[in-house]
Image (cartoon, grey):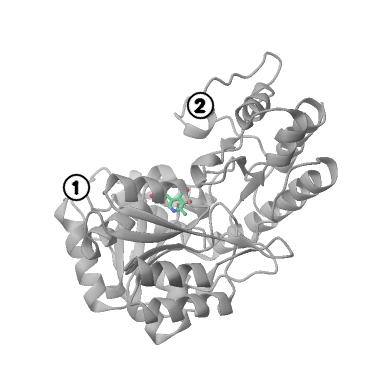
């Protein structure tokens, strides 16, 4: 491998959420075990060297005054979108967004009113629940269903009934899907867009995970599937998941339809918070290059090995935990209901048990499944193996 995905990096003293916080209430790590962070969506890997180089270059210049976003920023996005997603984007269709969730909120405020019903799929990324609730919108869930092979699928009949009966004209769509790890196939997107067209639905397509696609799957930008999709979709992207840069903040939207874009950007500007930071602009230019692409390739290979390892563990060594193999993202979403019932334990007890041996995993219930745990697999494979060994010996098969 050209890049390093094996070194265990000490993040102490950097204020890292993943490394510092234990997200399970009442849980503590027992003596003799160190913490293995496997929860919030960042990675235990160093970012691509090109990002640090770009940041150093900029930091060496001593002036950090107001700045004009350089053409190199737009060119980097245009190239990246062409190479990775096969789409042609123009400079004027790209806008900085202060976080993907910030972009969701601007779109929400531009096109919906407080109290209005908004469709999301369930399980639901917890950030969507937060922004919809905080903005006083009425969340309507359409449950994803697992088919005979365990693959999470949209329930089109249910979506249609909800659009029709509850007069819904706005959907927040997640592609790839967090936490289920689905990379939607073309026919699935086409079928969804038939409904969006029929019920005149504006779609926010959160594609923050679109670079983290595992072998055998292809990300299809939702806006690219038809002219109609182009005209009704607000697509959101970021470097934060791809290159582990959440702390730098710096997302962007691609909106082809002038009317939608003008409305979203008017709303985004009202708070006067939606201005890029010079360092996150430099980080994007640094990351979206050939080196960045090679790095993402090796990252996805590493993540795929981790997914295979964890999937084998849960399907072959643990009885009572159900899961679907992720196709994208680095999240694994576990349904522990049968295990809890067989062992007379609550999901809280199971979660605390994992943390007690240093496996810092995440309560999956806020993503709308009663016995769920979300597990982040973006860590060196040897550390993952250590976490699985502890889960085997002290938790699931104790
Ligand atoms: C689907 C999805 N959207 C948005 C975010 C957060 O994005 P941001 O930090 O840019 O608001 C995350 C973070 O995990 C995510 O998984």
In depth, the one of 74 and 234 nearer the eye is 234
Q: Label 1 crowding class (10 Å Cα cut-off): few <14, some 14-19, many 20+?
A: few
Q: Pinpoint residue 191: horizontal percent, then vertical percent.
A: 51, 79
Locate residue 134 relative to residue 54 in the image: left or right: left
Q: Secondary structure at mark 2?
A: helix
Residue at position x 25%, y 73% in the image: 260
The C terminus sits in image quarter: top right
Residue 371 vs 312, above or below: the answer is above
* Marks 2 and 1, how far apart at CA: 33 Å
Q: Is residue 234 visible?
A: no
Residue at position x 63%, y 48% in the image: 333
The image quadrant of residue 349 is top right
Pointer 1: what residue? 65
Callout in the foreground (2, 1) = 2
Locate residue 29 relative to residue 98 in the image: left or right: right
Q: Mark 2 vs mark 1: which is more N-terminal?
A: 2
Checking the image for residue 131, the label placed there is none
In depth, the one of 388 and 138 nearer the eye is 138
Pointer 2: what residue? 20
Residue at position x 30%, y 46% in the image: 61
The image quadrant of residue 226 is bottom left
């Amino acid at each position: 491998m050209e890049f390093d995905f094996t070194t265990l990096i000490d993040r102490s003293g950097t204020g890292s959420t993943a490394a510092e916080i234990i997200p399970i209430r009442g849980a503590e790590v027992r003596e003799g075990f160190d913490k293995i962070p496997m929860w919030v969506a960042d990675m235990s890997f160093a970012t691509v060297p090109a990002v640090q180089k770009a940041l150093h270059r900029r930091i060496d210049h001593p002036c950090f005054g107001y700045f004009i976003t350089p053409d190199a920023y737009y060119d980097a996005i245009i190239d990246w979108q062409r190479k990775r997603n096969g789409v042609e984007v123009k400079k004027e269709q790209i806008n900085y967004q202060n976080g993907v969730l910030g972009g969701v909120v601007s779109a929400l405020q531009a096109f919906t009113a407080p109290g209005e019903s908004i469709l999301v799929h369930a399980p639901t990324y917890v950030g969507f629940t937060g922004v919809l609730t905080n903005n006083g919108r009425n969340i309507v869930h359409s449950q994803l269903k697992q088919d005979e092979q365990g693959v999470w699928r949209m329930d089109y009949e249910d979506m249609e009934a909800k659009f029709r009966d509850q007069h819904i004209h706005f959907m927040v769509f997640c592609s790839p899907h967090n936490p289920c790890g689905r990379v939607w196939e073309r026919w699935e997107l086409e079928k969804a867009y038939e409904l969006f067209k029929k019920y005149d639905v504006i779609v926010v397509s959160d594609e923050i995970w679109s670079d983290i696609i595992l072998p055998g799957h292809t990300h299809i930008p939702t806006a690219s599937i038809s002219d109609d999709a182009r005209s009704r979709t607000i697509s959101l992207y970021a470097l934060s998941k791809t290159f582990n840069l959440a702390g730098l903040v710096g997302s962007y939207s691609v909106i082809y339809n002038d009317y939608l874009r003008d409305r979203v950007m008017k709303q985004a500007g009202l708070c006067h918070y939606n201005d890029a930071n010079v360092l996150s602009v430099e980080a994007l230019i640094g990351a979206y290059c050939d080196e960045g692409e090679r790095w993402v390739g090796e990252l996805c290979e590493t993540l795929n090995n981790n997914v295979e390892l964890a999937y084998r563990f849960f399907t072959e060594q643990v009885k009572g935990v159900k899961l679907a193999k992720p196709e994208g993202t680095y999240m694994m979403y576990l349904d522990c209901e049968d295990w809890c019932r067989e062992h007379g334990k609550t999901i809280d007890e199971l979660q605390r048990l994992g943390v007690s041996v240093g496996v810092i995993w995440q309560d999956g219930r806020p993503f709308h499944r009663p016995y769920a745990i979300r597990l982040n697999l973006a860590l060196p494979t040897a550390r993952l193996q250590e976490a699985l060994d502890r889960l085997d010996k002290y938790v699931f098969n104790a």
